[in-house]
Image (cartoon, helix red, strand yellow):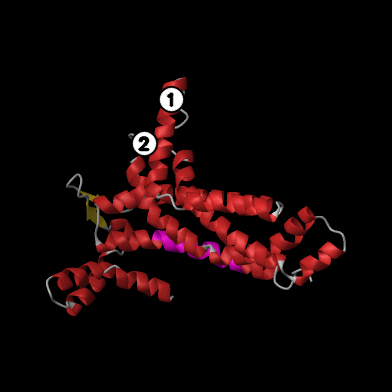
Amino acid sequence: MFSLLGIVLISGFPVLIGGLMEGELRLSEYLSSLQGVLKEIWPLQEFSVMNLRTGREMFLFPTIAEYIFYSLQILFLAFAAAAAFALAFTVLTMLLSEKARERVKLFLYFLESLPDLLIIMAAQLGIIFIYLKTDVLISKIAVVGGDRIYWLPVLCLAILPMIQLYRLCMLTFQEEERQMYVELARSLGFSKVFIVWIHMFRNAIISVFFQSKKTIWFMLSNLFVLELMFNMPGIMLFMRDNMSPEVFLVAIFSFFLPMFLLYSVGEWFFLRHFRGKEVA
């Protein structure tokens, strides 16, 4: 509830910021702006905005739904890929010796220091290089017309979050490795693969899930750069061309609600099926 209220309050910030830049605190204008946003945006089907690129007025719905859906597809596909690869690399790393673990961690942590813009440019140049050498275009490097591209933007958006989740997974799994139930399982003769995959995995995944919220918000901050570099018709570029408090409010809600549902359902699932089931 407080999150929803915060989103509504933030939608009127442009008025406050504009006043502060002129040395004024426009509280009354800010409150009027919030009231106007809530009045104008309902009913949604009749709300229209001025497109800054074309200079023409357009209905917000259902036009914005296409942009929102495309951005959410890229975001959640990238998050799913990042989580899957992070967990797979973590399980494989935990099966290695301590010396080998440190080498793998050092390499991946080095990749984490690379800026997202460099990763996107390297991926696009790599596609061009492959095309020049083989005359095979494995992916488009930009959206043209009504086309959609998926796997390359998803890959670029997933790399840094995957490393962040990998770091988080490693810390969580190593903490689990020091628990008494792991020592007990070892003394009973269970293999390392069995202990990591069956016992440690299900205990660590709960902590990783709840702490991954920061990662998905980090991905949102990179989504604008991604859409700009690939010329993707996503919600970030729609906001750039149609910026207004009403569009901002709808866009933020469109991201907040799916993530709220995801973590609410995830919390219910993990607490229902895993609480109290740690191997002791």
- The amino acid sitting under disc 1 is Tyr
The answer to whether 186 is drawn above or below residue 84 in the figure is: below
Q: Which residue is mark 1?
A: 131
Q: Which quadrant would residue 13 be assigned to in this image?
A: bottom left
Q: Which residue is mark 2?
A: 142
- Horizontal arrangement in the rendering, residue 210 relative to residue 180 (left or right): left
x and y percent of residue 187 in the render? 86, 64
Instruction: Residue lying at the far right in this picture: please name it.
Output: 188
Q: Callout 1: helix, strand or loop?
A: helix
- Horizontal arrangement in the rendering, residue 74 relative to residue 203 (left or right): left
x and y percent of residue 258 in the render? 48, 60
Q: Main secondary structure of the magenta part?
A: helix
Q: Callout 2: helix, strand or loop?
A: loop
Residue drawn where x is 77% and y is 66% of the image: 182
Q: Comparing marks 1 and 2, which lies closer to the viewer?
A: 1
Mark count: 2
Label 2: how many Cα within 10 Å (few below 14, some 14–19, many 20+): some
Q: Would residue 52 be counted in the magenta stretch?
A: no
Q: Which residues are magenta?
A: 254-267
x and y percent of residue 152 in the render? 46, 39
Residue drawn where x is 77% and y is 59% of the image: 195
Q: Would residue 258 be counted in the magenta stretch?
A: yes
